[in-house]
Image (cartoon, rainbow, N blue to C red):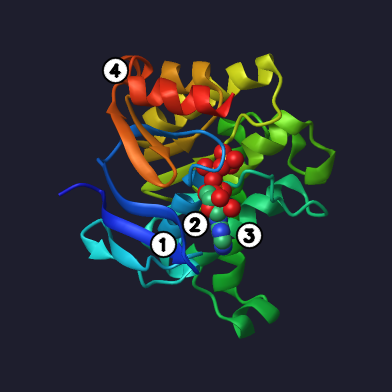
Amino acid sequence: MSLLEVNKMSVNFGGIKPVSELDLHIEQGELIGLIGPNGAGKTTVFNLLTGVYTPTEGSITFDGERIDRLKTHQIVKKGITRTFQNIRLFKQMTVIDNVKVAFNNRLSYNTVEGILRLPRYKKQEEWLQEEAMKLLRIFELDGYANELSMNLPYGKQRKLEIARALAGKPKLLLLDEPAAGMNPNETNELMHTIKMIRDEFGIAILLIEHDMHLVMSICERLVVIDYGNVIARGTPEEVQNNEKVIGAYLGQA
Ligand SMILES: Nc1ncnc2c1ncn2[C@@H]1O[C@H](COP(=O)(O)OP(=O)(O)OP(=O)(O)O)[C@@H](O)[C@H]1O
């Protein structure tokens, strides 16, 4: 069984169907690109996978369990985390605190232990600090740990968002246009970061991205959607030469 199995998933908003009968399978450790023209339904797919929307038809099975009726925080606990098209960091918090909050669902002290700062709280706080620093080091953000996140350069804010998503220890990471707004150097660095995550963390990644060079360079398989329907699947080479795909992108121009 695949890590993620989406079968005939649709969502209907008062007659509009941004996603229609979508099938999607992702295996452990795969790096898959979800591409398509503007308004094709890509972000809606992410919102369905993460419980922001509930599918009106079809099913989502993750790690052998149905998740399509679960709430977002329950899905995070099952092992799916994401980043957003527009950066959603806690701007007024430090870099390390942005990562620490995401470890929350892995802590086990209760409120009283927290308020009284009892030993279990202290031990977990130390663990939290170490784990958060480890993640920051991997992303070369440890030097910025105590800066406010809003003061980081744009590319580093994007990296921090990914680091925060990894703090939840996902089995599947969803990245929504991580290269949006980046300059070519930042995009290049991001490409290495995404590859590194997959190799070091051994997790599956589903990537929405308009930067075709990035997508074609790092994804093993691509799924192309248009008007909420899958119009092509395959390796980057196969998809690049697919007439329906070319037509969909030209139609946009
Ligand atoms: N809650 C909603 N109610 C009504 N329509 C919606 C809702 N959410 C999304 N849509 C519509 O679904 C379509 C797909 O939007 P979506 O944001 O998923 O596309 P996208 O492929 O991510 O586009 P982009 O590449 O521009 O980010 C759009 O026409 C959008 O207006």
From mark 1 to mark 4, how far is it between C-alphas?
28 Å
Please tell me which of labels 3 and 2 falls first in the chain: 2
**Which residue appears at 35% of the width and 26% of the height?**
244
Q: Earlier in the sequence, mark 4 or mark 3?
A: 3
| SS of the residue under disc 1 | strand
Q: Callout 3: few (<14), some (14-19), or many (20+) C-alpha neighbours within 10 Å?
A: some
* Type of amino acid under label 2: Asn
Q: Amino acid at mark 3?
A: Val
Vertical placement of 196 versus 55: above or below? above
Mark pair 3, 2: CA separation:
21 Å
Q: Is tag 1's residue or tag 3's residue first in the polypeptide sequence?
A: 1
Where is residue 1? Give x, y as percent: 15, 49
Residue 104 location (% of width, % of height): 56, 64
Q: Which residue is mark 3?
A: 101
* Quadrant, the C terminus: top right
In percent of the image, x 41 and y 56: which residue is there? 49
**Residue type, mark 1 in image:** Val
Q: Real-space Cα distance between discs 1 and 3?
A: 31 Å
Label 1 or label 2, whichever lies nearer to me, is 1
Q: For mark 4, what is the residue?
A: 238
Mark closer to the chain start, 2 or 4: 2
Task: Tell whether circle 4 marks a residue whose Cβ is less than 8 angstroms from ligand 1.
Answer: no
Where disc 3 sits, the SS reads helix
User: 243 or 156, which lies in front?
Assistant: 243
Disc 2 within 8 angstroms of ligand 1 (CB) = yes
- Label 1 vs 2, first from the N-terminus: 1
Pair 4/3: label in front: 4
Q: Position of residue 136 (x, y in %)?
A: 62, 38
Please give the residue where the numbered disc 1 appears in the rendered image.
11
Q: Where is mark 2, residue-wise?
A: 47
